[in-house]
C-alpha cells in the first residue's frame, strides 16, 4: 500500500504542478507529500524531481518513470472498473467503424455471436477505408490497421499483422521467384491505387524502411480484387496476413521476399477515451480480442 501511495502521489504532484496543490487535493500537509516523494526516490535510488521553492522539474529518469506510472494507474483503474462492471449488463447502441475489406472478413461475421451474448446491445457497422473523425462522427469504436498517430485516442491492440508479397504457385512457376527487391522490376506487380495514384510497397532493407513504386499491367483501388488476381496467377501482390493467411496455409499462395518484410501494421481498436468507458465498448473490444487470439482463427478464414 505504501509503494502505491508513493507512486500515486508522484503522479499527482506532476499533474498539479506543486506539492502544495497535491496536498490540498488530499487535504493533508505538504510535508507529508514531500516525505512520500523522498521515500520513493530513496527506494528507487534516483532523483525523480528537481524541487525548488518556486517550481518542479522532472529529471530524465523521472520523465521515463512518470510514463510507466501513468500506464500502471490507468490499467489499475481499468481493472477495478472491469471487476465492478462484471455483474452489470452491457446495453445500448454501438457505432463501429472498420476498413472495408477487414470489416467484411473479420468483423461482420463475428457480430451475430457477440450480439447473442450481449442481447441488450445493438450495432451499426460502418465499413469504409478512410480514417474517420471519431468524435465528430460519433464513432464509439474504430478498427484500425496502422501505427497510431493521434495521441488523443486510446488504442487496444487486437492482433498482430504483417504485410507480405504473395503469388500463386502457377505464377511463380511461369515467371520465377524474386530473390531481391531489384528483381521486382521484371515481375507483374498488382498494385493498389488511392485517389488516382499508386500506393507503394514498403520493405525493410539495411535497417531502414524503403517504399517502392512497382509496375504491372493491372491496378485497382479495391484490395479484394488484387487478392483475387493474385489467386488467379496474374502477378505478385503485397497484402496483409489477415487477408491471405488462410491461402498461404492452404498452399494457394506463397510468400516471397520475406527477408525484406517491414514491421507490421498491427490491428487496433481505438476509442476517444479511457475513463468511464461504457461496458458495451469494453465487452465488444474484449470479444474481438479473444476471437482473434484463438490459435486457429487466422488459418480458418
Image: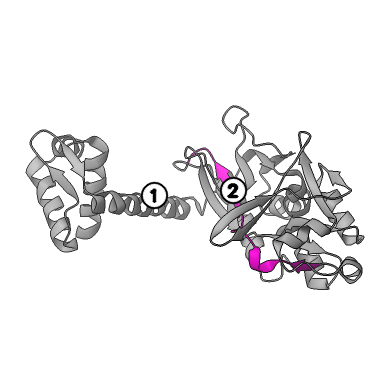
> Which residue is at 62% across, 61% downward?
290
All told, the count of numbered labels is 2
Left or right of 3, for residue 189 = right
- Quadrant hosting residue 300: bottom right
Q: What secondary structure is marked by label 1?
A: helix
The answer to which of 120 and 49 lies nearer the viewer is 49
Q: Alpha carbon of mark 2 to alpha carbon of mark 1: how far?
A: 17 Å
Give the image quarter of residue 27.
top left
Visible in this render: residue 1? no
Other residues around mark 1 within 10 Å, as few (<14) / some (14–19) / many (≥20): some
Magenta span covers which residues? Answer: 254-273
Residue 267 belongs to magenta span: yes
Q: Is residue 164 left or right of residue 137?
A: right
- Residue 20, position in %: x, y? 13, 36
The answer to which of marks 2 and 1 sits earlier in the sequence is 1
Magenta region includes residue 216:
no
Label annotation for residue 74:
1
Residue 11 lies, in percent from the top left, at 26, 46
Residue shown at 30% from the left, 52% from the top: 64
Instruction: Kindly give the residue lying farthest to the top in the view shown.
Output: 136
Give the residue drawn at x 63%, y 29%.
137
Quick one: label 2, few (<14), some, or many (20+) residues within 10 Å? many
Label 2 or label 1, whichever lies nearer to me, is 2
The quarter in which the N terminus is drawn is bottom left
Q: Is residue 198 left or right of residue 295?
A: right
- What x and y, as percent, mark residue 296? 71, 70
| Disc ID at residue 269 | 2
Where disc 2 sits, the SS reads strand
The C terminus - image quarter:
bottom right
Image position, residue 283 (x, y; %): 59, 51
268 or 149: nearer the eye?
149
Tell me, yes or no, if residue 54 can be seen here: yes
Amino acid at each position: 500500500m505504501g509503494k502505491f501511495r508513493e507512486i500515486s502521489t508522484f503522479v499527482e504532484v506532476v499533474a498539479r504542478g506543486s506539492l502544495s496543490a497535491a496536498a490540498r487535493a488530499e487535504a493533508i500537509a505538504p510535508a507529508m507529500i514531500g516525505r512520500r516523494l523522498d521515500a520513493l526516490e530513496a527506494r528507487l535510488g534516483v532523483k525523480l524531481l528537481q524541487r525548488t521553492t518556486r517550481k518542479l522539474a522532472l529529471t530524465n529518469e523521472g520523465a521515463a518513470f512518470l510514463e510507466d506510472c501513468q500506464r500502471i494507474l490507468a490499467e489499475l483503474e481499468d481493472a477495478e472498473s472491469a471487476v465492478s462492471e462484471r455483474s452489470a449488463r452491457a446495453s445500448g447502441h454501438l457505432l463501429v467503424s472498420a476498413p472495408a475489406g477487414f470489416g467484411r472478413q473479420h468483423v461482420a461475421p463475428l457480430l451475430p455471436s457477440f450480439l447473442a451474448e450481449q442481447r441488450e446491445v445493438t450495432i451499426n457497422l460502418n465499413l469504409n477505408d478512410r480514417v474517420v473523425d471519431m468524435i465528430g462522427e460519433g464513432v464509439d469504436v474504430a478498427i484500425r490497421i496502422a501505427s497510431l498517430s493521434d495521441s488523443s485516442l486510446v488504442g487496444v491492440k487486437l492482433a498482430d499483422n504483417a504485410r507480405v508479397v504473395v503469388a500463386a504457385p502457377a505464377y511463380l512457376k511461369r515467371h520465377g521467384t524474386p530473390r531481391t527487391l531489384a528483381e521486382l522490376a521484371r515481375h507483374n506487380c498488382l498494385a493498389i491505387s488511392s485517389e488516382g495514384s499508386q500506393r507503394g510497397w514498403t520493405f525493410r532493407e539495411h535497417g531502414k524502411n524503403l517504399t517502392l513504386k512497382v509496375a504491372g499491367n493491372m491496378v485497382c483501388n479495391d484490395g479484394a480484387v488484387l487478392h483475387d488476381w493474385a489467386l488467379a496467377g496474374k502477378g505478385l501482390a503485397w497484402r496483409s496476413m489477415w487477408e491471405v493467411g488462410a491461402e498461404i496455409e492452404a498452399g494457394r499462395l506463397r510468400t516471397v521476399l520475406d527477408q525484406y518484410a517491414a514491421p507490421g501494421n498491427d490491428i487496433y481498436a481505438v476509442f476517444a477515451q479511457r475513463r468511464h468507458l461504457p461496458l458495451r465498448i469494453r465487452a465488444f473490444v474484449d470479444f474481438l480480442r479473444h476471437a482473434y487470439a484463438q490459435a486457429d482463427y487466422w488459418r480458418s478464414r
